[in-house]
Amino acid sequence: MQPQRDLRGLWLLLLSLYLLLFEVARAGRPVVSCPAACLCASNILSCSKQQLPSVPHSLPSYTALLDLSHNNLSRLRAEWTPTRLTHLHSLLLSHNHLNFISSEAFSPVPNLRYLDLSSNQLRTLDEFLFSELQALEVLLLYNNHIMAVDRCAFDDMAQLQKLYLSQNQISRFPLELVKEGAKLPKLTLLDLSSNKLKNLPLLDLQKLPAWIKNGLYLHNNPLHCDCELYQLFSHWQYRQLSSVMDFQEDLYCMSAKKLHNVFNLSFLNCSEYKERAWEAHLGDTLTIKCDTKQQGMTKVWVTPSNERVLEEGANSTVTVSKDDGSLHFQRVQVEDGGVYTCYAMGEAFNETLSVELKVYNFTSHGHHDTLNTAYTTLVGCILSVVLVLIYLYLTPCRCWCRGVEKPSSHQGDSLSSSMLSTTPNHDPMAGGDKDDGFDRRVAFLDPAGSGQNGKLKPGNTLPVPEVTGKGQRRMSDPESVSSVFSDTPIVV
Ligand SMILES: *[C@@H]1O[C@H](CO)[C@@H](O)[C@H](O)[C@H]1NC(C)=O
Ligand SMILES: *[C@@H]1O[C@H](CO)[C@@H](O)[C@H](O)[C@H]1NC(C)=O
Ligand SMILES: *[C@@H]1O[C@H](CO)[C@@H](O)[C@H](O)[C@H]1NC(C)=O
Ligand SMILES: *[C@@H]1O[C@H](CO)[C@@H](O)[C@H](O)[C@H]1NC(C)=O
Ligand SMILES: *[C@@H]1O[C@H](CO)[C@@H](O)[C@H](O)[C@H]1NC(C)=O
Ligand SMILES: *[C@@H]1O[C@H](CO)[C@@H](O)[C@H](O)[C@H]1NC(C)=O
């Protein structure tokens, strides 16, 4: 009897000790832990394939990777996460039913580097939608229903390297994403395959550096067949650019409702593609780029007589630029003609490029000069008349991303937006602006003035610099047209 009672006491003691420990452990745990629908592995939250109709509440603030793919999300509102997730670098939202994303949805995740929105039902990309994501490197938007890419949708994404827009309904080539001076300086991959592109800005594409063209995917589009298209892609093929080499069979065009491979347009009798030589005249200055497929390669030029070209600063008429490794001729001589070779060395691969230079034994200017001057004057005159006419009668294009022209460019709206700005509660926000009252008055004058007759020129030009300072504010700016538009979808 005695030993048995002792044992029971011991059990009770152990049990109460255990309960006590359990309580202590529970109290010590952070308030936020793994949401019920997710599997958590330290900072990775995997919540995929759970039929979730919304993002789980109270995600831990240390989350680095959040997988919400294969769920039933249809809207991503501004307050989808009440806590800021500053450690989040990857957000996976593919295979949901997303058809709305608030323009402030990405404010709580400023350090995102990888965003997967593929296989959803997005139709438009509003301006500044991604502009909070200044660290984003990869953006997946393929297999949606995107018809139009707003000219400003990808503004301020200085780190963006890869943008996948394939399998959408895009019919306008978004040249602003790739052309020189674009706001995506690091973009090396733009996938526009399997869309509805019919026409391409061929001349602009021709001018792009090879490292952009190398990642510009355009296959599976109903492009319009012509010899210029053939010449463009033949050049890319000659340069062995990945965008063409990897998808030669899928690169087609339409003619008379029939599909043709771009490299088999025999019915058009296009002339065979030939790499053209550079042409120069006696005494010209000339710069030839070493147009490599990769950025930041080390470049060495070799002359036709197999001598290495020295860097600029050397006492020579032919030098290599220190900045981008291009070949520079101070005053071209007939003897300079021949084949120059650029050897480029990169981390992943080496490249060799040959460029032929033809020099004519006469200068480019001579007796043509007087004729040229007369001609340019005439063209200049006509151009200025046309510009004045355009200025007077046509409303300028709407989308200049943020800033100067926006309010004055959309005249009907500049009226309404300036009306908005007169509401008293916005005045404290515009505190620093001395010319506030003046600006508003002119803004009211502006649409009326140009609407009746185009002669109120001073009135038209004045408000532009005035608006500048304020227009630079972003979505929250009560006075810019963009705020009027982009705020409307935020129902929440
Ligand atoms: C997904 O959400 C829609 C409404 O948004 C609802 O009608 C549907 O039943 C949901 N599907 C599942 C599997 O929960
Ligand atoms: C080129 O196109 C013609 C029809 O346009 C077709 O008969 C021929 O087989 C094609 N050749 C190749 C190599 O694809
Ligand atoms: C292409 O050339 C053939 C004969 O070589 C000619 O019959 C045909 O009309 C030409 N087609 C075009 C579009 O020039
Ligand atoms: C440059 O080289 C030429 C001959 O190649 C020589 O006549 C000239 O003095 C040199 N100039 C300088 C600044 O070294
Ligand atoms: C590129 O060329 C350099 C010099 O010839 C060589 O050392 C290097 O290994 C090459 N790199 C590759 C990736 O082939
Ligand atoms: C260039 O033309 C001049 C005459 O205009 C001639 O004397 C000279 O030999 C020519 N040079 C070459 C390299 O053909």
Image (tube, rainbow, N blue to C red):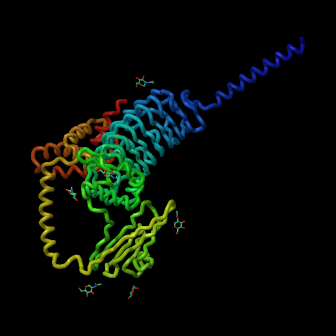
- Identify whether 376 is placed above or below 162: below
Q: Position of residue 21 (x, y in %)?
A: 71, 26
Quadrant of the snapshot with the N terminus? top right
Q: Nearer the viewer, residue 12 or 292?
A: 292
Q: Is residue 32 left or right of residue 332?
A: right
Q: Position of residue 155 (x, y in %)?
A: 36, 48
Q: Residue at x 80, y 19 (%)?
A: 11
Q: Nearer the viewer, residue 432 or 19?
A: 19
- Identify whether 210 is placed above or below 105: below
Q: Extreme right residue here?
A: 2
- Identify whether 441 is placed above or below 96: below
Q: Extreme top residue here?
A: 1
Q: Residue at x 31, y 71 (%)?
A: 278
Asked if one can make out residue 155 in the rendered structure from this viewpoint, the answer is no
Q: Which of the 4 image quadrants contains residue 234?
A: bottom left
Asked if one can make out residue 247 in the rendered structure from this viewpoint, the answer is yes
Q: Is residue 228 left or right of residue 349?
A: left
Q: Nearer the viewer, residue 333 or 306?
A: 306
Total count of labels:
0
Q: Position of residue 185 (x, y in %)?
A: 39, 55
Q: Is residue 390 left or right of residue 74?
A: left
Q: Residue at x 51, y 36 (%)?
A: 67
Q: Position of residue 182 (x, y in %)?
A: 35, 54
Q: Is residue 382 left or right of residue 240?
A: left
Quadrant of the snapshot with the C terminus? top left
